[in-house]
Image (tube, grey):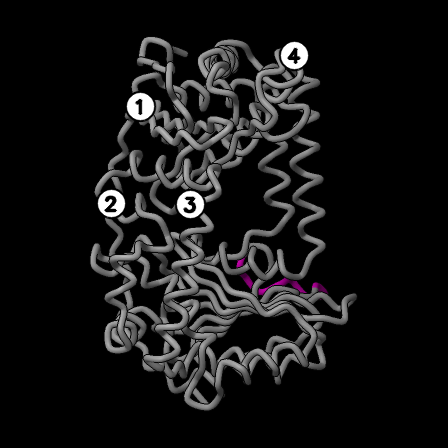
Amino acid sequence: MAKLQKQKNSNSEGKRPKAGKRAYVRKTVLGNGLTVLTEKMAHVRSVSFGVFLNGGSRHEGEAQHGLSHFIEHALFKGTTRRTAAQIASESDVLGGNFDAFTGRDVVGYSNHVLDEHLPVAFELTADLVTSPAFDETELDKERNVILEEIKMTEDTPDDIVYDIFYESFYPGHPLGRPILGTPDTLSTFNSARVRAFYEESYRPERMIIAAAGNLEHDHLVELASEYFAGMEGGSGRLELERPDFSAPITPRHKPDLEQSHLVLGFPSPSAVSEDRYIVDLLTLILGGGMSSRLFQSVREERGLVYSIDASISAYIDCGFLSIYAGASTEQLGETIEAIMREIERIKTEPVGADELERNKNQLKTSFRLDQESSSSRMSWLAVNEMHFGRYIPPEEVIEQFEVVTPEGLLRIANQIFQPDKLALTVLGNLDGFSIDRSQLYC
């Protein structure tokens, strides 16, 4: 069993609870640097747990483009003890939900099972993460699967337009590259290259095991110590190169599309900014739901689009606020003009008390409902640890939403929505469509 160190039970402030109060969130750091986080939910009969790697596609070199996602797939293709078929069979027998994902800054392997199945499910997940076989034949099969995944994405224009936007917004930086890689880079991923990148990336000091549900913290620490003790720790420090953003107008002609798609974006505060709660609220007011300004103005009042929304893509050192819409090419110009007018309005007119309170209630309700899911709480533990090194209790989040003011929204709106920092990507049958920066004033 690995030596334990820095063991800490935490309440909402990351300190020991006062006498008489029970700590539901606990944290332990193993001797090799791996972090174990749990939240006890005694009212459920299940456990959600995951292994999260602090690192994703933004940490790849140009020749490694797509390797993080490729390894995520490859881990399911067999270990030194199990074949791919055995992994699938044992997972299905548990009847849970075994899944994985690759993002630009994190890779995750998660499972949701009955509490009584935690030891078996954890051993299966640990075997997959710590003992991959990287068999050349299986890698070739999975390469073909990912090539099909790339083709599927290319047939989904609302995905393609965001890939193009990322590439133009973060030119020459790994954040600007598609997570899946390209056929050219995939063709170079043999067993030796895959294993080398795996050993470089999958280090215990860069990994978090997070769990929420009906479990005991000490039991999960014992499981983590048993199955991850063989992973040797090191410095593991991630060196992040903060990207420079660009603000181009990027039209992409795709004549076979019936509808044109646009993404309009501005640089915005990072995921760890003190202004992140104001940004969340601003985004919701602008385009976060059916009562949002963009939905009501551009769709309901003017009938220009079927789909329109605003969203935040935030990383630890940067981020952007984007607006997506799908419209006919003939109505693209009018759609963009309507969007710009709503942006101008939110920069110049304070949000009224009723609208502010309604959106605060929507955010708080959505957040509270999300917290009823053990999977969401598991993810919340991991994200908070990666971004802040501490647990942020739901009460603190609610309090931060409550104190947002119209003046704060105006300040952030004017900070974000600067015309010279606006990037626009348009994808579709663009015959007859043209736009210049003079039409993007706000």
Q: Quadrant of the C terminus?
A: top left
Q: Which residue is mark 4?
A: 301
Can residue 3 be seen here?
A: no
Kind of residue at badge 3: Glu
Q: Position of residue 118 (x, y in %)?
A: 64, 79
**Residue occupying image coordinates x 40% and y 72%:** 141
- Measure the alpha-carbon separation of dots 3 and 4: 32 Å
- 215 with respect to 387 (left or right): right
Q: Position of residue 312 (x, y in %)?
A: 48, 36
Q: Please, what secondary structure does the residue beneath circle 4 have?
A: helix
50 w.r.t. 368: above or below: below
* First to last magenta residue range: 14-21
Badge 1 density bin: few <14, some 14–19, many ≥20, Cα 10 Å: some
Q: Please, what secondary structure does the residue beneath circle 2 have?
A: loop
Q: Which mark is residue 173?
A: 2
Kind of residue at badge 4: Glu
